[in-house]
Amino acid sequence: MSKLPQSFQFLDLSDYGRSIARLIANGLKNTRFTPIHVTIGFIISGILAIFCMFNGNYWAAAFFLIFKSILDAADGELARIKKTPSYTGRYFDSIADIILNFLFLTAIWYITEEHIGFALLAFMLIQLQGTMYNYYYVILRNQQNGDKTSRVMEDHAPTALPGEKQKHVDLLYRIYNTLYIVFDKTIYWLDKKALDNKPLPKWFMTALSTFGLGFQLLIISVMLVSGWIDFIIPFFIGYSFMILVFVGIRRGFLN
C-alpha cells in the first residue's frame, strides 16, 4: 500500500527496498508480529552493521545497512496491511533512526580518525537532509489525502489511535520532539511557505529523495565496499549544499 494516491506517486530513490518490504509485511500479515517487532528488527540490523564496520567486514556492514532500510519500510507496510496505524510506532521508528544515524557516524569517525567536529557536523547535516525530504513529502501526502500518520508540524502530542495508549504516545512524542525539534524548525524556517504551495512535481520529489534515509544508507554502503570510508563524512557535509539548492528551486520556480 502506497503513502500517496497513484496519480501523485513518484520514483523514490530512497525507497528501493519497498518490494521486498511488502513481501516481508505480507508474510507477517497473519502472524503475531507487529510493526513494533519489525522496528526492533531494523534496530538489531543497524547494530550488526556497526559491529561489522568495527571488524572491517564492510560487505557485511553494507548488507545489514540495506536490510535495515528494507525493514524500515516493512514496519509501515505491516501497519497498513494490518490496518493498525499508530503514533507509537511512528515515533519509535523515528527515534530509532536518529540514534542509529548517530551511531553510524560515530563508528565511521572512530574507524577513520576523522575530526570529531566534522563527524558531528555530518550527523547534523544528514538529519537536516532527511528532515527536508520528510517535510516536503508529508506536505504532499497531506495535500493529496495520503498517509497521515506523520504530521507536517509536530508541535503537540497527538491523540492516541485505537489500540495504543495515550501515555505511550505522550512519552515517545516528548523524546521525538527533543531529538528532532532543531531540525524540524530549521527546515520550516527555510521554507515555511511550502505549506501553502501547489503540489510539488514528481521530478522534484525524485531528486529530493536522494535526501531520504534509505538513499543515505545506500551511499554509505557503496562507499564502504568501494574502500572509500574516509570520504563518507566529507561527502555528506559537501552534499548538504543541495539543501539550499532545493529550497531555492522550490521558492523560486515552484511557488
Image (cartoon, rainbow, N blue to C red):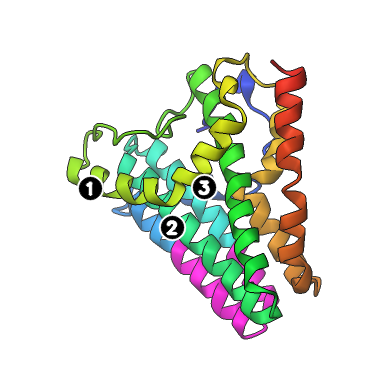
Q: Earlier in the sequence, mark 2 or mark 1?
A: 2
Left or right of residue 165: residue 210: right
Residue 68: percent from the left, percent from the top? Answer: 54, 60
Residue 193 numbered mark, or none? none
**Front position in the image: 205 or 57:** 205
Q: How far apart are marks 2 and 1 (CA)?
A: 15 Å
Q: Which of marks 2 and 3 is in front?
A: 2
Residue 199's place in the image compared with 104, above or below, is above
Residue 158's place in the image compared with 79, above or below, is above
Residue 90: percent from the left, percent from the top? Answer: 39, 43
Q: Is the magenta stretch mostly helix, strand or loop?
A: helix
- Write the start and end of the magenta stretch as one range: 42-66
The kind of residue tagged 1 is His
- Crowd band around label 1 with a 10 angstrom C-alpha radius: few (<14), some (14–19), many (20+): few
Residue 80: percent from the left, percent from the top? Answer: 41, 36
Residue drawn 72% across the image and 57% down it: 236
- Crowd band around label 3 with a 10 angstrom C-alpha radius: few (<14), some (14–19), many (20+): many
Residue drawn 55% across the image and 39% down it: 186
Q: Is residue 56 magenta?
A: yes
The kind of residue tagged 3 is Ala
Q: What element carries label 3?
A: helix
The kind of residue tagged 2 is Ala
Residue matched to label 2:
96
Residue matched to label 1:
168
Residue matched to label 3:
73
- Place residue 41 in its image quadrant: bottom left
